[in-house]
Image (cartoon, helix red, strand yellow):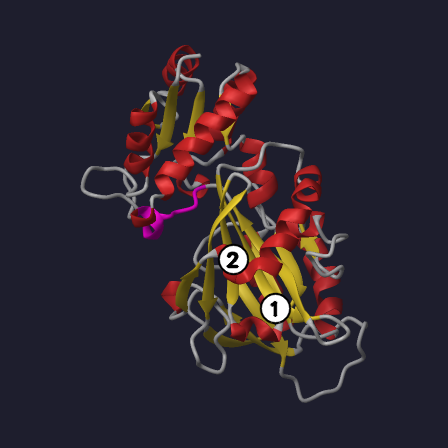
Amino acid sequence: MKKHVVFFEAEGGTDKGPDGHRKDTMPMVNALVPKGWTAEVIYYSDTDRPAIFDKVVATADAYVSRINPGTIPGGEASYFQMLRQLCDAGVVGMPHPDAMVGYGAKDALVKLRDTSLVPPDTHAYYKTEELHEHFPVTLSLGERVLKQNRGSTGEGIWRVAVVDDRSFTKGQPLPLDTKIKCTEAVDNHVEFRELGEFMTFCESYIVGDYGMLVDMRFLPRIKEGEIRILLVGPTPIFVVHKKPAESADAFSATLFSGAKYTYDDPAKWQPLVDMFLGTLPTIMQKLGGYEIPLIWTADFMLDNNEDGSDKYVLGEINCSCVGFTTHLEHGIQETIADEIIRTVERLKA
């Protein structure tokens, strides 16, 4: 065993500090050293891809990806291809690129809709024709949320409600001139549009690599906050309670939109944590059977069971490049270093 780990980053971007690295990368690199391991950062580029591949295969036991795939110049396909080749060559992927897609893509919700985590009326549109055919029907049943697969901080996530004076039959397609109210999560701004024109606008979210839209019911209790579990491997580290701003149309739980965050010990949310950990084997199986990501989050919203008790609904999983600078003072980098070593030793034994 080489006891060496490579951390992949991309040069430039607003997430970098004065040293050119993400603020959470070097703490992980440095945390491995006292444990008898070494680590380095390699900036990925398509031009240097062959040389990078050869170096990592020759020197490293594992890689940790710290690149948001959507920010890679030229697209993420070539980066993912290299990561697959590294995994095939025996390098431990953290995470495997197909785990990034399986866990991180919005349609993970659709793959889990036959579990207790996700409402069964959750859909994914991979073709624009599917959007135009099915969304007028689902919207007739009540408020919906459309989520694009790309973007971040709420961009391309729309709460859609009918505000037309006419009455319509539930379960029947709404006419294209139906008046709708659209609120985008990125900043809670409101746009009044017609259904047909809005669907045409949303086509841009579907075209291109990994393009899709997920359509799920709007849960009014989002006003009580989104609950994010931050995990290192299978271990919950923090639970972040993200409370949207108080304005009438606010439903976004991003800091940019004015949401307020509180950071809790997982024990404060024990029923949610126990429920989620109990479903991990099912989640792993349904999302491709890959190793659990090294650093990942699961976001939940509150709903009600038929008896009125609280029910937690999964809204999103993130694993491609989860930031955790807020938690560095609590030593999360040490926990991550330990998990890296445990995983490599287990898979390389």
Residue at image mark 1: 302
Name the amino acid type tagged 2.
Ala
Q: Give the x, y percent position of residue 135.
A: 70, 64
Q: Is residue 53 left or right of residue 36?
A: right
Q: Is residue 105 visible?
A: yes
Q: Is residue 49 left or right of residue 206?
A: left
| 152 relative to 268, above or below | above
Element type at mark 2: helix
Q: Is residue 41 visible?
A: no
Name the amino acid type tagged 1.
Leu
Q: In the depicted view, which residue is nearer to us: 130 or 141?
A: 141
Q: Which mark is drawn over residue 267?
A: 2
Label 1 packing within 10 angstroms: few (<14), some (14-19), many (20+): some
Q: Please name the residue shown 74% across and 74% down the image.
A: 140
Pick the quarter of the image with the C terminus.
Answer: top right
Q: Give the x, y percent position of residue 187.
A: 42, 69
Element type at mark 1: strand
- Residue ranking furthest to the front: 267
Q: Give the x, y percent position of residue 226.
A: 52, 65
- Specify the segment rendered in magenta: 321-328
Q: Give the x, y percent position of residue 133.
A: 74, 60
